[in-house]
Every structure is written in C-alpha cells, then in structure tokens.
Amino acid sequence: LIMIGRFLNGFGSARSINRRFIADVFTRKERTAASAAFVSAAALGMSAGPALASLLSMMTFSPESTLWTKETAPGWIMLFLWVVFLIVFSLYFEEPDRKHHLSSRRANATLELTSKNEENTHLLADEAQSSDHAPEKKAEKVQTVV
C-alpha cells in the first residue's frame, strides 16, 4: 500500500512540470540558477511547515472552539496560503510560448544534422584523396600483416 501511494505521489509530482517550465522559459545559462531556486523554495517549504506546526502547538487555544485547535490550525493556515497562491498564480502566471522553442529546437537539430553531414562528406573526400595518392602504403600494410 505504501509503494502504491509513493508511485501515485511520484506520478503526479510537480518535478517534471517544473523542469519543463524551466526548459521552456530560461536559457541554458540560466537553467542551473532557476533549478536551484525551485529546489530552494521546496526545501524552504518542507522546513517551514514543521517549524510553523511546532510554534502553533505551543499556543493556547480556547477549549470551547472545535474549529481552531492545535490539530486544525496548521490545516487552516495551509488553506489560507494555498488560496493566496491560487489568486496570485491566476493573476500573474503566463504560459510560455512553446512554438518558438520548438521551432528553434528543430532549426538547431536541422543545422546540427547539416553540419554533421558536411563534416562526414569532407572526411570521406579526404579519405578518397589519401587512398588515390598512396596506394603503395596500403599494399605495404597488407604485406607486413601477411
């Protein structure tokens, strides 16, 4: 059961989405810094959450309240933070233009293939020229091997 839960958590995790966003938005030189910022923000959240929960456990709450208790306070604070995040995200997030990235990647791939083909053509031409000019060397090599 634990393995199934871990599988579902990993399957729906945001890491792949974050990496895709970083690859689409940032240049190659900026990607390391952007990835470090994403990891730092995640680490901050994983450390700030338990710290906040421990601070809330030290507070005294009204015994009559069933809505705001030591057990429910972290959940209510997280609800508030997620609502703020959702509002900010909805107002300010812009989807990156992937068409530009895809066309530039295709152009780069075509350019790389073209340059590799030209390089291979030059290598083959050089080999052909060297074999035309020095047939004796090949014959000598064959004789020494035999």
Image (tube, rainbow, N blue to C red):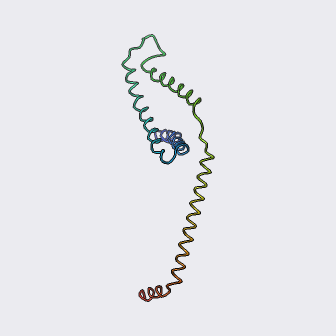
Image height of 65 relative to 123, above or below: above
Image height of 114 relative to 35, above or below: below
Percent position of residue 143, x then y: 44, 89
Seen in the image, is 73 located left or right of residue 107?
left
Query: Residue at horizontal 57%, vertical 67%?
Result: 118
Quarter of the image for the C terminus: give it: bottom left
Query: Residue at horizontal 56%, vertical 60%?
Result: 112
Percent position of residue 122, x then y: 55, 71
Percent position of residue 90, x then y: 59, 30
81, 89: nearer the viewer: 89
Image height of 75 relative to 97, above or below: above
Query: Residue at horizontal 48%, vertical 88%?
Result: 136
Percent position of residue 44, x then y: 42, 33
Q: Residue furthest left?
A: 58
Looking at the rendered structure, the number of numbered marks drawn on it comes to: 0
Image height of 105 relative to 34, above or below: below
Query: Residue at horizontal 45%, vertical 45%?
Result: 32
13, 89: nearer the viewer: 89
132, 17: nearer the viewer: 132
